[in-house]
Amino acid sequence: MKSDLVRSAAGLFEASLVLPGEGNLSLRLPGEDAMILTPTMNRYADLGVEDLVVMSFDGEVDERRSGSRAPSSEYRLHAAIYRHRPRANAVVHAHPPEAAAHAVLGRPIPMIMEEMAALIGGAVPCAPYRRTGTDDLVEAVLANLGSGNAVMLAHHGLLTCGRSLGDAMDAMTVVEKLAGIHRRARSLAEGRMPEPPDADRAFLLKTFRDRFSTT
């Protein structure tokens, strides 16, 4: 599990979805109220399994299974997702540029393409700004996440969750792609966006609930 987390962290960096010091990733430990979490101030190109932190959802570090690095300051956010999403086994937080641009404006990404319903549960909401690493941010994210697997954090970035680390990473890249499509479509339409078709939405959302939902 630690090796998977290190590989995924490197993948975020290589895809230019984070810079050194940004973002964090975690995995739920099966059968425990605990998680494996990336450390604070990541340098993704140099991150190793020995740098990862094992900690309880209450914030207690398991020294025996952890390295010497301090955990990400966003550990409360990860723990809250696991507590409130029984089928969430991975959480990814990054600062992808297209999604972050929407987050700066506090602008949700509407349900513009069918894959949004099938893969992430529909539109991507934006939680209001709250200071990073605080309980206020946790409350804002939980209040705005809805039933989907992705939420933007105003003036901050994007958070996704999934039944697996692969699902959470896929949700991250899908939202970033859709954020870019939304920006370009608005430009082409001169701001007059057409309403998305909804004929197959029920079918697509059933696919999401059966395959990807973490609720």
Image (cartoon, rainbow, N blue to C red):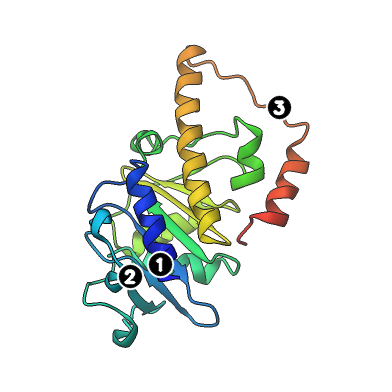
- Judged by depth in the image, the label closer to the viewer, 2 or 3, is 2
User: For mark 2, what is the residue?
Assistant: 49
Residue 197 - label: 3
Secondary structure state at the residue bearing disc 2 = helix
Kindly identify the amino acid type of the residue bearing the numbered disc 2.
Answer: Val
Is residue 3 shown left or right of residue 168? left
Residue 66 - label: none
Is residue 70 shown left or right of residue 140? left
CA gap between label 1 and label 3 equals: 41 Å
Residue 214 sits in quarter: bottom right
User: For mark 1, what is the residue?
Assistant: 3
Q: Where residue 51 appears, x then y in whole percent?
A: 27, 70
For image coordinates 22% across by 72% down, the residue present is: 69
Above or below, 99 against 51 in this view is above
For image coordinates 39% across by 50% down, the residue present is: 11
Nearer-the-camera pick, 38 or 51? 51
**Proximity of marks 1 and 3: CB atoms separated by less than 8 Å:** no
For image coordinates 27% across by 62% down, the residue present is: 47
